[in-house]
Amino acid sequence: MPHLRPWFALVLLALLASCQSQPGNGKRSTYGDRPGPQGFKTVIVDAGHGGKDSGARARGLVEKQLALDVAKRLRSELWPGFKVVLMRESDRFVELDSRVSIANRYPDAILVSIHFNYGSRRRAGPETYYWRSDSYALAKRVQRNLSAVAPYESGNAGLVRRRLRLTRNPSIPCILVECGYLTHASEARLVATSSYREKLADAIAKAIRDQSTYGDAGMGPIPRPIYAPPSRAGDARG
C-alpha cells in the first residue's frame, strides 16, 4: 500500500484481520474453540438413521421415517432465506463418518441432525446435544424453542454436552436434536400427527434464524472448549 498514509494502512490491516477471525467466514475449526456462528446462510439437515438402520421403533412409529419428515419440513421452513442441504432425501443408509465428511464440504455452514428418542415410558420431551463451544448457543436456542412447544417433559435430559460423532467430529458448528420420546404414550400420539411435526420443524427453524441473526448474544457464557479426540464407534456416550 505505497500510497496510503501509514496510520490508514494500519487501520485497514486491523480491519481485515478482524474479518478473518470472525466465525461464519468459511474457516473450519477442529475443536470448535471459537464463538458461535453468525451470518451463515447454509444449513445441513441430517435425518438420522435410514435404510437398514431404522432407529427407534415404538408404538407403531419408526424413527428414520419421522426424522426424514421433520428434516424436509425444516428445509421448507428455512427456504428461501437459507441454502439447505439434506444429508438424505429418501430412505437410504449413510454411514456416520460419511455424514461428517459431507458436512465438512461446507465450511460456512451449520449441521443439525434430527432424531427421536427411546427410553423409559415415563420419559418425555426434547433433548439437544452439543460438544463444541461454537455450537452451544445454537443448541440452547433449539432446546428452548422445542421445550416451548412440547407439552410433555418428564425425566428428559434437556441440553446436553456429549461427545458423539455428529457433535464432535465435524469441523463446523453441529448439534444433534432428539425431538421427543417415541416410548412415551402421549408424546408418541403427538409425534404421529403432521401438525405437531410441523411445530417441531418451525421451532428448530426459528432457533437457526435467530442464531444467524444474533450469534451468541443473549445466550449467556459460552462453555470452555474441551480438547478431546474425535468420537469413534464404540466410544462411551458421555
Image: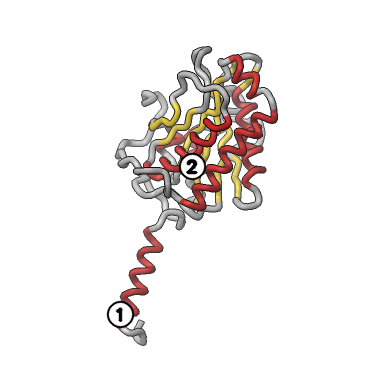
Q: Is residue 182 above or below residue 108?
A: above
Q: Is residue 79 above or below residue 15?
A: above
192 horizontally vs 97: left or right: right
Where disc 1 sits, the SS reads helix
Q: Write the residue at 62% across / 52% down.
A: 81
Which mark's residue is nearer the viewer, 2 or 1?
Answer: 1
Res 197 seen here:
yes
**Identity, as a three-letter code, of the amino acid under mark 1:** Trp
Q: Which mark is residue 59?
A: none
Circle 2 residue:
101
Give the Cα distance between marks 2 and 1. 44 Å
Q: Is residue 215 above or below residue 70?
A: below
Where disc 2 sits, the SS reads helix
Q: Is residue 4 above or below residue 218?
A: below
**Identity, as a three-letter code, of the amino acid under mark 2:** Ser
Q: Write the residue at 59% across / 30% down.
A: 93
Q: Which mark is residue 7?
A: 1
70 horizontally vs 131: left or right: right
Q: Write the residue at 63% across / 42% down.
A: 75
**Quarter the C terminus occupies:** top left
In this view, the residue in front, 144 or 33, is 144
Residue 70: x and y, percent?
63, 33
